Amino acid sequence: MTGNTDQGNTDRGTGQDRGTGHHFVRAGRRGRLLAVPGWNTIRGRVAVVLAVPTCLLLVLTGLAVVDRGADWAAARETQARVDLVLRVQALVHELQRERGLTNGLLGGARQYRDDLGAQRERSDLARAELAATLGEGDADTVSAVEGARRRLLGLAAVRSGVDGGSTDRGKTFAFYTASISALIRAQSADGDDAARGDRALADGVDALQALADATESVALERGSLNGVFAAKRFREAEYLEFTEVRAARVAALDQYGGSATPAQRKALDQAFATGDARRATALERRAASAADGSRFDVDPAQWWRSMTVLVDDLYAVQQRVGADVRARAGQLSDSATAQLAGFLGLGVLIVAVATALAVLSARSITRPLGALADEADEVAGARLSEAVERVLNWDGPEAGSDTAGQPVPVPEEPGRPGEAAARSSAREIAQLAAALRNVERTAVGLAAEQAVLRRNTSESLANLGRRNQSLLRRQLGLITTLESQEVDPDALGELFELDHLATRMRRNAESLLVLVGEHAPPRSWSGTVTALEVVQSAVSEVEQYRRVSAADVGPCRFRGHAVAELSHLLAELIENALVFSPPHLPVEVYGWRDVDEYCLAVVDRGIGMSAAELDRANARLAGKESFLVAPTRFLGHYVVGRLAARLGAQVELRETEGSGTTAYVALPSSLLAAPIPSDRPPGPDQVRALLNGFREGVARGAAGKDSA
């Protein structure tokens, strides 16, 4: 037994796998695109297309978030810095007062002794409060303030010198001035970046710094002249220092006027318009007139009181300007917070909208495509087969009639889900749906045409088989008559050969009817037939019957209605074994009982079959393929498969030990009859009577079909 070899599935010229329909991925731009995750799906491609502008928008939003975050951080930092500046100014204010009282005491005004003690306590309290909150504010300012505060570590020694009268007034005044100047410089560290582009905040910071310088100039003048007034004259370079302080105050006030708001300038003007401020100005002019070192008589207490009121008023203006700057920083912080929340919300909204658009866009494409794909699968899996089944079961005109060539009507199925989805989708998908509908109509039409062709072919083959069967019936009847009348042995032998040839032709005609699904006229046996008789009947229907040996056929009886088809099945298997085995080797037939079944084996010693060929042959024997697509040399397998299905038997080909192929037939118990005690091997006369009985049955069946 032989089989064909499968052809390779890969077309090297196109790079396409014809077995699967998929193209190999080539290198280059297309390969890189296919490497993108999700690019092989519509959802992935929509997501990628929308992800690019979304990412750009998110980048822009992120830049805005970063910028607003920097503004928010700068505003918060400015608030903390202003708080620190105000605490530093509180300490500076107390040190300025202590400096003035100390300078007056060293100048000879002993009445400042009690006031100086109380002032030192207030200065120490301000130092402690500043140290307790020094961790707030930006790092550079905190570091600068901490450095300036360390200069005050020598304050205790200076105070001891003042109390003991062992220190110089100029050096003491210089120590206080240097310490206060360090604190003022420290509070302005990195003040240029605090405003982050806001002009009002920048002007407020500048005004606060200028006012601090002006207040220090006024306080410095208060302390310096307090000692001068106590000493009744200027000593050495004190007048020069006095003029420098006045010039620094004027410069600071001019800078303040350029940065302050109208309300802040008005508050400063009010501070300089008080009666104490005017008295201090008059005393200042008297001091300016003593540039030559001459003595003058000015009450230091009056100067101190007037200047202290002015310094306190200036400090109050400082507090107000600081509050304004802090309020402006708070507004900027709140605005930056709102904008930051807005940009973050915008980013979330962009992501949500992009995601929703991606999902909706993908669904608007994939849902109708999925419906069309489901419909196409349904067409391929069910509707085509249903159309073919309707054509095969159609009770229309017979093949060969005037209307036989007309197409078989295939009804449309309205209201398909794919059509509604396509109509509500994009124009391209609607066009695709229309194209698929056209493909479906064409495919159904072709399937119907093929089904009609197959039906007409089957009917033609069946008609041809029945005609041949009718002719062979007549021929066998004539041969039987001649055999009964012939007395010449040689002529009788030739008639037997002719009888055998006609019997084989009848089997071929019956095989044709079996292939097209037609049942041959009944050749049923009225009683039961032994297994050996069935084997001998099958052997009588093959050409090289002399090479067949019923080696060991166990006793068994079969019901008469199955004898003809079982004999036909065995004849096909025996014929196949004879064809594919050497002419000098016999083909052996075995039969045995196996529990409730009866098994037959047809054994040949031929060239055998490969494992793949055995699998394909067994698939044909099991009825899993159509005979219309098979090579003609395998038609016997399909005949055996059809007959086995009718009998409920199982047929399988296996390798013969050594070489060759063995066909195993397992017959069900429904075909078996109860054994008869007198069963014994039939003689030649019994076999001939059996064959004649089969022929008479065929003749009766054919005559009945012709009359019908």
Image (spheres, helix red, strand yellow):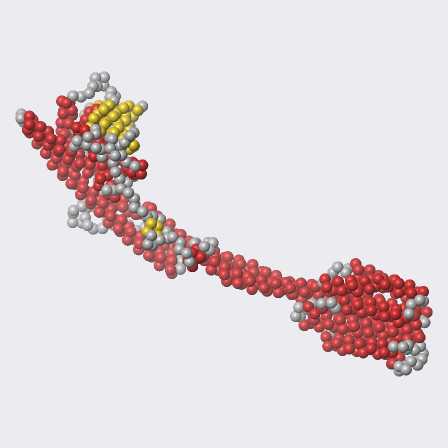
Whole-percent x and y of residue 436? 33, 54
Q: Nearer the viewer, residue 396 or 462?
A: 462
- In the picture, residue 228 is in which quadrant? bottom right
Report the front residue among 627 and 342: 627
Residue lying farthest top?
Answer: 677
- Above or below: residue 157 compared with residue 607: below
Picture coordinates of residue 272, whole percent (x, y): 82, 76
Q: Quadrant of the C terminus?
A: top left
Residue drawn at x 33%, y 57% is 434
Residue at image position (31%, 38%) is 612
Disc tally is 0
Q: In the image, residue 148 lies at what x, y percent?
A: 79, 65
Quadrant containing the N terminus in the rendered view: top left
Using the rendered view, name the quadrant where residue 320 is placed: bottom right
Q: Is residue 514 visible?
A: yes
- Above or below: residue 460 compared with residue 256: above
- Residue at x-position 84% and y-position 73%: 220
- In the rendered view, does 698 fall on the left or right side of 416? left
Q: What residue appears at the point 21 percent right and 29 percent down from the top-left corner? A: 585
Q: In screen coordinates, is 263 left or right of 303?
A: left
| Quarter of the image where one finds residue 65 | bottom right
Residue 640: percent from left, percent from top: 24, 34
Q: Observer-nearest residue: 535 or 262?
A: 535
Q: Is residue 87 visible?
A: no
- 664 or 454: nearer the eye? 664
- Say whether residue 447 is left or right of residue 403: right
